[in-house]
Structures are given as structure tokens and as C-alpha cells.
């Protein structure tokens, strides 16, 4: 166990957050981070499945930094390798000998990737992938789906992804204040799991569509699986109309299987974006596909750049992380068992307390949301969101946080388990939820 630093307990999260807000707009460098700010939580450190605040309170975390830490926080196997590497320099802007190894590991793991380019965040990699798709096809239209999040860049951000309540999440209003309204002119949004709307759009504008981008299992509207046949239909329509299929596997990549959701679901996208688990907690993303699709980048015709893109520390983390995943082939079964156990126990606990809840899961990613009425089996985005009791969920979140369990205050944000979430830890999670429900 890590020793508590001596400076702790002199300041409360509340005091420190108030001071931080003087110099960091909103208190944190992401709007998503500031959604939960009503109950101040300022952290000192993290390890395994736990986070410690500045008052030295330990909490079990099931948000896990939005998902990168598949082996838990501060995993010595990744941290150690990167720390060693840092002493040898982290950023030079010149190719590094580990680039080859990292590229090979990704290409070997993800079924449809032969070549990649690295970037620093999911947002950046997606922006570059969509530009490449437009370059390759010579078309401009990009099709997205309601509830799917593809980062905060100008052409893909929808209001739905950045709000904390159901009312504004519904309606999928384009953009956020300050965005160029015309930026979304070429971005068309369809309801998720609606084959009719898909067919209609391709019939009307199929020859203008550069790309269809989606999360193969949607993890940003709660967890919403594709209906059987829906992804196959998209792939088929895209192929027939010369549009590229782009899988945003920022969450699912290396999380639901070594080869991501495309391996799990046996669908072959043209371009894939991976991030989160890829760097085991270090900021790195990659986008890639066949050599043919990546050729404009190989020839330096399509433009993608970044001083920190593929920096040595990030690439080292990729090598360490994929190396560890390959050395632990049973990790996905282990995580799936843990997820299944937690899903079952939580379902029992919510039922016993007489609450309607929607729990959905894909391996170690799950979403838990209190509902205003009986759960709807309709997996359409609207149907999921409309039923969520955002206020009750938020009250439950606060109670759990006070009792030592952290999950995101927004019920559309999933829970992520790691190998550090042992059966004992999961029992504690279930117990905390049960006790918090009793006080709700
Ligand atoms: C987190 C996320 C992104 C954005 O990644 P950033 O690193 O925050 O820019 C994109 N797509 C999906 C599916 C995500 O979950």
C-alpha cells in the first residue's frame, strides 16, 4: 500500500477545488470532469481499483478514468517500463526504434489494421481518420449515429454527448455554443439500430457518403448493443455505395477483446480508431486500416501531424500494454466473468429495493441507470435515454461516493472494470449500492 504523503489532510477537496477554480476554468480541464463537481472530489493518487482524495479517503472506482486502466491504476508492468524509458528521453520528433514494435503489435492484434498513425487522443485520431476517409473517397458526407461520441472536434460534436441530463440529451441538437454552424452541414446523424432510416439515407445520398462512423457497441449513451444484423447491414450498404466503414473503437479496442469489437462481432471496418486501453493510462491513440487505405498518408498526400503524436513515452506504453495483454490471453474471460457477476448481483439488489434499472454490459464495460418506469427492451437511443431518472441516479451517485464508491455522475457514462476488481471488491461495490439504495 502506498504511504499517504505528509501534506495530506491539511486541505479538503472542497477547499482545494475552490482554489483550483480560480486558475482552472470550471476546476478541471474537461467539461465532463466538471459535471460531478457538486460533490467535490480532488484526488491525490490512484492504484489498482482505488482512488484517494486529498483528505486521504479511499474510494473504489468503477469509472477508472473512462476506461484505459484494464489492469488497474498505476500498473507496475506498464508504469515501470515507461518510467525506465522516460529517463532515456520522451519526445524528440524523430522516429523511434519502438515505433516498429508498437505498429506490429497493433497490426497483429486488430484484424483489419495493417498500418497505423499515432495521435494523442481519440478526438485527434478520429479527426484524422475522417479527413483520410474524405480524401480517399473524394466525398464529404459523414454519417454518425445518435448517442455515439466521436470526440469534441468541430465536425462531429453533438450536444447529446456533452450534457448531464436527459432533456438536452434527447433531440441530438447539433454542436455546442461557439461552434461553426456550417461545420455540421456534411455530418448527418441517424438513429442507432434503425435499419429503415439507414436504407433511406443511402438510397437518397449514397453516392455522397464518404464514411459511416460508429461505436460498434455504443458506450456513450449508456451501453447499447447493435441489433442483430444492423452492423452487417451498414457494412453492406457502405461497401455497395463506395463509402468507408469507420469503427470508433476508442472504448472497445483492446477492452472487449484483443482485436476489439470487430473481432468479437466479426465485422471488417475500413478504418479503425483505438485509444483508451491502448496506452494503459498514457495519452495515446491510433487510427489505421489496410495499406491501400493508408496510402495517402504513406505518400504524405493526406495531412496528419503532431509534435507529440507517437512520442516515445506513448509508444513505449503501447508496447508494454499490448505485450501484457498478449501474455494474458485469459484476461478477457476473467473480466467478462467479473462483469457478469457484478451485473447479476446489481440486478438483484435493484430489484430487491424495488427500483427500475437498466443494466447493459459488454464484457467489462457496463452501464447502470435508474429509470423512471419499467425497463424498455427497445435498444433505440431515445428509448434508453427517455426512461433514465437522471436526478435519482445523481442522488444515488452522491450517496455511493460518500460511502466510498465512485462511478460517473452521468448515467450515460459506462462503468469499466479492471483485473484489480476482484470478487471481494465487487462484493463491496454491491454492498455499497445496496446500502445507498436504502437511503435514497
Ligand atoms: C473517449 C472517446 C472518444 C474521445 O477520446 P478523447 O481521448 O477523449 O479525445 C472518442 N470516441 C469514443 C467512443 C470515446 O469513448
Image: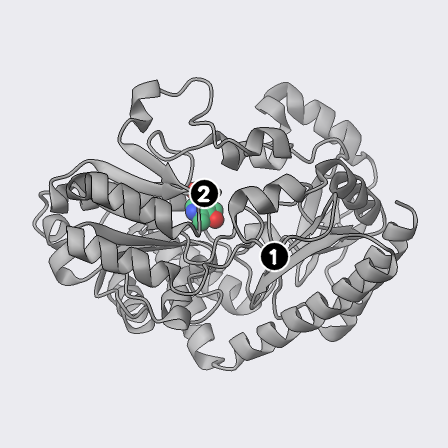
- Position of 228 relative to 388 (above/below): below
Residue depicted at x 70% and y 32%: 37
Q: Nearer the viewer, residue 269 or 189?
A: 189
Measured from the top left, where is residue 64 in percent x and y? 61, 54
Measured from the top left, where is residue 122 in percent x and y? 40, 46
Left/right placement of residue 7 relative to residue 288 reads right
Asked if disc 2 is less than 8 Å from ligand 1, the answer is yes
Q: Nearer the viewer, residue 346 or 27?
A: 346
Q: Residues within 10 Å of mark 1 (few under 14, many from 20)?
A: few
Tell me if residue 361 can be seen. Answer: yes
Q: Nearer the viewer, residue 237 or 428?
A: 237
Left/right placement of residue 177 relative to residue 110 reads right
Q: Which residue is mark 2?
A: 149
- Position of 116 relative to 338 (above/below): above
- Position of 248 relative to 325 (above/below): above
Left/right placement of residue 72 relative to residue 332 reads right
SS at circle 2: loop
Q: Quadrant of the C terminus?
A: top right
Q: Earlier in the sequence, mark 1 or mark 2?
A: 2
Badge number at residue 377: 1
Left/right placement of residue 169 relative to residue 59 reads left
Residue depicted at x 67% and y 43%: 387
Tell me if residue 90 can be seen. Answer: no
Q: Residues within 10 Å of mark 2 (few under 14, many from 20)?
A: many
Residue depicted at x 80% and y 40%: 395
- Quadrant in the picture for residue 38: top right
Q: CB under 8 Å between callouts 1 and 2?
A: no
- CA separation, marks 1 and 2? 22 Å
Residue depicted at x 37% and y 35%: 156
Residue that protrudes farthest toward the right in the picture = 439
Badge number at residue 255: none
Amino acid at each position: 500500500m502506498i504511504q499517504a504523503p505528509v501534506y495530506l489532510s491539511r486541505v479538503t477537496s472542497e477547499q482545494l477545488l475552490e482554489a483550483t477554480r480560480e486558475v482552472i476554468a470550471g476546476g478541471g480541464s474537461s467539461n465532463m470532469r466538471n459535471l460531478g463537481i457538486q460533490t467535490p472530489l480532488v484526488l491525490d493518487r490512484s492504484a489498482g481499483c482505488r482512488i484517494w482524495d486529498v483528505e486521504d479517503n479511499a474510494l473504489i472506482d468503477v469509472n477508472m478514468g473512462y476506461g484505459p486502466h484494464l489492469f488497474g491504476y498505476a500498473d507496475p508492468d506498464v508504469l515501470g517500463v515507461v518510467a525506465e524509458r522516460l529517463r532515456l528521453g520522451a519526445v524528440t520528433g524523430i522516429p523511434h526504434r519502438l515505433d516498429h514494435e508498437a505498429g506490429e503489435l497493433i497490426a497483429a492484434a486488430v484484424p483489419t489494421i495493417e498500418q497505423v498513425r499515432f495521435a494523442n487522443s481519440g478526438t485527434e485520431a478520429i479527426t484524422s481518420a475522417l479527413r483520410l476517409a474524405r480524401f480517399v473517397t473524394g466525398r464529404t458526407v459523414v454519417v454518425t449515429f445518435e448517442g455515439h461520441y466521436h470526440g469534441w472536434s468541430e465536425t462531429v460534436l453533438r450536444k447529446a454527448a456533452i450534457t448531464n441530463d436527459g432533456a438536452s440529451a434527447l433531440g441530438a441538437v447539433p454542436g455546442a455554443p461557439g461552434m461553426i454552424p456550417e461545420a455540421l452541414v456534411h455530418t448527418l446523424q441517424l438513429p442507432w439500430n434503425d435499419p429503415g432510416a439507414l436504407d433511406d439515407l443511402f438510397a437518397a445520398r449514397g453516392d455522397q457518403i464518404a464514411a459511416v462512423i460508429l461505436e460498434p457497441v455504443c458506450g456513450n449513451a449508456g451501453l447499447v448493443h447493435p441489433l442483430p444484423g444492423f452492423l452487417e447491414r451498414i457494412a453492406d450498404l457502405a461497401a455497395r455505395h463506395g463509402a468507408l466503414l469507420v469503427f470508433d473503437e476508442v472504448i472497445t479496442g483492446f477492452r472487449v477483446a484483443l482485436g476489439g469489437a470487430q473481432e468479437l462481432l466479426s465485422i471488417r471496418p475500413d478504418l479503425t480508431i483505438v485509444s483508451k486501453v491502448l496506452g494503459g493510462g498514457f495519452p495515446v491513440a491510433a487510427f489505421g486500416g489496410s495499406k491501400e487505405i493508408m496510402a495517402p498518408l504513406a505518400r504524405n498526400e493526406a495531412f496528419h501531424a503532431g509534435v507529440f503524436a507517437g512520442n516515445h513515452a506513448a509508444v513505449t506504453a503501447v508496447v508494454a500494454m499490448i505485450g501484457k495483454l498478449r501474455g494474458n490471453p485469459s484476461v478477457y474471460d476473467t473480466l467478462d466473468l467479473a462483469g457478469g457477476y457484478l451485473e447479476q448481483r446489481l440486478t438483484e439488489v435493484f430489484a430487491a429495493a424495488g427500483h427500475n434499472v437498466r443494466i447493459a454490459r459488454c464484457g467489462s464495460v457496463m452501464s447502470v441507470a435508474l429509470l423512471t418506469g419499467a425497463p424498455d427492451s427497445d435498444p433505440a437511443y431515445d428509448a434508453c435515454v427517455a426512461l433514465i431518472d437522471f436526478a435519482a441516479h445523481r442522488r444515488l451517485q452522491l450517496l455511493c461516493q460518500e460511502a466510498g464508491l465512485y462511478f460517473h455522475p452521468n448515467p450515460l457514462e459506462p462503468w469499466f472494470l479492471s483485473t484489480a476488481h476482484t470478487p471481494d471488491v465487487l462484493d463491496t461495490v454491491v454492498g455499497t449500492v445496496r446500502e445507498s439504495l436504502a437511503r435514497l
